[in-house]
Image (cartoon, grey):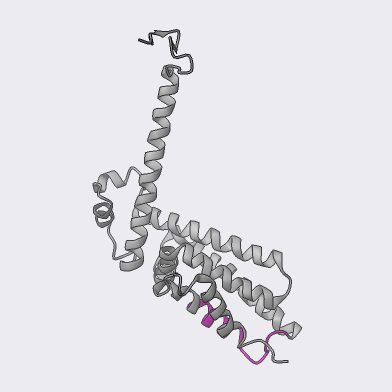
Amino acid sequence: MVDCRIRRNRVVGCPSRKVPSKCSLIRHAIWETRLTSRSRRDQILHRAGILFASRGVAGTTVREIADDVGILSGSLYHHFESKEAMVDEILSVYLADLRSRYQQVLTESSEPQQQLRQLIRASLEVAAAHPHATEIHQKDANYLRALPRFGYLKAVARELDGVWLSVIDAGRRDGSLRSDVDPRTFHRLTRDAIWLTVRWFKPGSKYSLNRLVADCTAVFLDGVSTRL
């Protein structure tokens, strides 16, 4: 029989095994608590995003979110101070991703037509990655802008619209895009069509995200490209 008595923080007879110290046990417990809290927080945001997207922000209550997650309403406030805080975090992550992708497009290419192709791709990929946030932003942007916490939405919208319009204008100037199509009309039609794909597009083996990008590019960009 192996003698596995504990001596000086080591298991006698089992030299490869150590008895965890009190500090290490405490650190592990704290880590597990944080992990559980983080997972629960992510779960709340995910379920809240689904409800906000389907019912609207104003039409969703904290109690409904708590019931959907399976916790008490009071427990939800341990993770978020308010319903608006949940919406804010969902939209902030989505908009940060979108802004980053747009800046990447501008950095990687200087040709307007190629930039437009990549803007279409970036927009569709971000929408696919954040479908609920995309739907919330499209459905409730006007409602949210009236709330003090979401004053930044108008500035972000101007920034994103400005990227599209500057690229379109550059293409009109260098002759790669038609000058007889109003740039704002082209931008709005393209933008709204792209964002609304979250309501019907479900990627699969028969129709992939890459196919959607190719089809949208063909419909929107080829229609405004100058014909040689």
- Residue at position x 48%, y 62% in the image: 129
- Residue at position x 65%, y 66% in the image: 105
225 or 149: nearer the viewer:
225
Q: Is residue 5 above or below residue 180?
A: above
- Specify whether 75 is left or right of 221: left
- Residue at position x 43%, y 33% in the image: 31
x, y percentage for residue 217?
58, 79
- Residue at position x 67%, y 76% in the image: 167
Determine which quarter of the picture holds residue 104.
bottom right
Determine which quarter of the picture holds residue 118.
bottom right
Task: Look at the image and give the residue range highlighted in magenta.
Answer: 176-192
Q: Is residue 227 above or below residue 37?
A: below
Q: Is residue 9 above or below residue 80?
A: above
x, y percentage for residue 220?
57, 83
x, y percentage for residue 143?
39, 68
Q: Quadrant of the N terminus?
A: top left
